[in-house]
Image (tube, coloured by chain):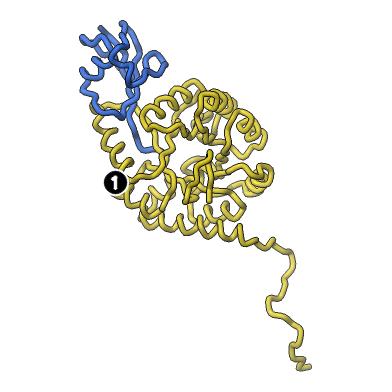
Amino acid sequence: MLTLYGQEIESRLLLGTARYPSPEILRQSVLASKAGILTVSLRRETAGGKGGGVFFHLIRELGVRLLPNTAGCHSAREAVLTAKMAREVFGTDWIKLEVIGDHDTLAPDVFELVEAARILASEGFKVFPYTTEDMGVGEKLLAAGCEVLMPWCAPIGTARGPVNAAALKSYRSHFQGVPLIVDAGIGRPSHAAFVMELGFDAVLLNTAVAGAGNPVDMASAFADAIEAGRQGFLAGLLEPRDMAVPSTPVIGKAVFS
Amino acid sequence: MTYIVNGESWTGEARTLAELLAALDHEGDWLATAVNGELVHRDDRSTFDLVNGDRVEILSPMQGG
């Protein structure tokens, strides 16, 4: 079973809650996904606190563990304050730490990310850092107090899937024993199955489900793909070969010439 | 009293953070507040005195990825 910061999580799918066609489709998608963790966020309230309250109650009723994020933050200072406010609202010290460094790619500012992780970990937060596949940055995040790493496989929302599979494979090999969650860039169930086959521990996605033609069915498809990928990894995958190998034994084959 | 509330100027009689929330019709236990970049805990709002020009942030749960 997946264990994150000492908590056992039954599902290896972490699902975002944004961009669904309606609250009801969000609710049905969460149920179909069997997600063990839902990501949520905070924004300025403009409707007397009532808009946020509707969403707050919907999420609470689902009964799934929450992982608030610091989406939209561009500095360690912003992210730390947002994390503290999220802890006040959601009552959890888990935080998905996002510190954006580039507007076009939404790539993390890894310098600010590491600094924010250090501050938050020292204040008791359980930090889930959204990062790149750079192993040096991963090492610094672990040194800062993170016990989980969340490398992207492509820029957020691009649905491009694992564009640098070799780097992800190296990342997995390098961080033996560290829970690794692929966060961002997943577009299809096959992408999720692929990274799970590499040995990643879980997948975090949002747009691939919320933006699908049928989000509820897509949530179910991702749940199956992630489970299939995990089972494939555990079962031991064959490495690709350059030359053909007959699957049918040739010993005892009739000779007609 | 004039404060900057979620980036916009607001003028009224509220003198504490709790009074400001009430004046703005913000309700519920799902709000988080910060003044001048520092978190103000829920339990401290009624005793947190605001001064002219304070920057107040009021956040609530939203969908997120």
Question: In this picture, is A22 found above or below A142?
Answer: below
Question: In this picture, is A206 found above or below A248?
Answer: above
Residue that sits furthest to the right in the current view: A257
Instruction: Specify whether A167 is left or right of A15.
Output: right
Q: What residue is at 63 percent from the left and 35 percent from the top?
A: A138
Instruction: Specify whether A164 is left or right of A212.
Output: right
Q: Between residue B3 and residue B44, name the one nearer to us.
A: B44
Disc 1 crowd rating (10 Å Cα; few below 14, some 14-19, many 20+) is few
Label 1 sits on what residue type?
Ser
Q: What residue is at 74 percent from the left and 64 percent from the top?
A: A242
Instruction: Specify whether A123 is left or right of B54.
Output: right
Q: Mark 1 highlights which residue?
A: A22
| Picture quadrant where residue A86 is located | top left
Residue B9, position as x, y percentages in the image: 28, 14
Question: In this picture, is B9 found above or below A18?
Answer: above
**Chain ID, yellow in image:** A
What is the chain identity of the residue bearing mark 1?
A: A
Q: Between residue A239 and residue B16, name the one nearer to us.
A: B16
Residue B18, position as x, y percentages in the image: 26, 16
Instruction: Specify whether A137 is left or right of A219.
Output: right
Q: Between residue A183 and residue B22, name the one nearer to us.
A: B22
| Picture quadrant where residue A181 is located | top right
Residue A134, position as x, y percentages in the image: 64, 37
What is the quadrant of the C terminus of chain A in the image?
Answer: bottom right
Residue A214, position as x, y percentages in the image: 35, 55
| Local SS, label 1 | loop
Q: What residue is at 46 percent from the left and 43 percent from the top?
A: A157
**Chain ID, blue in image:** B
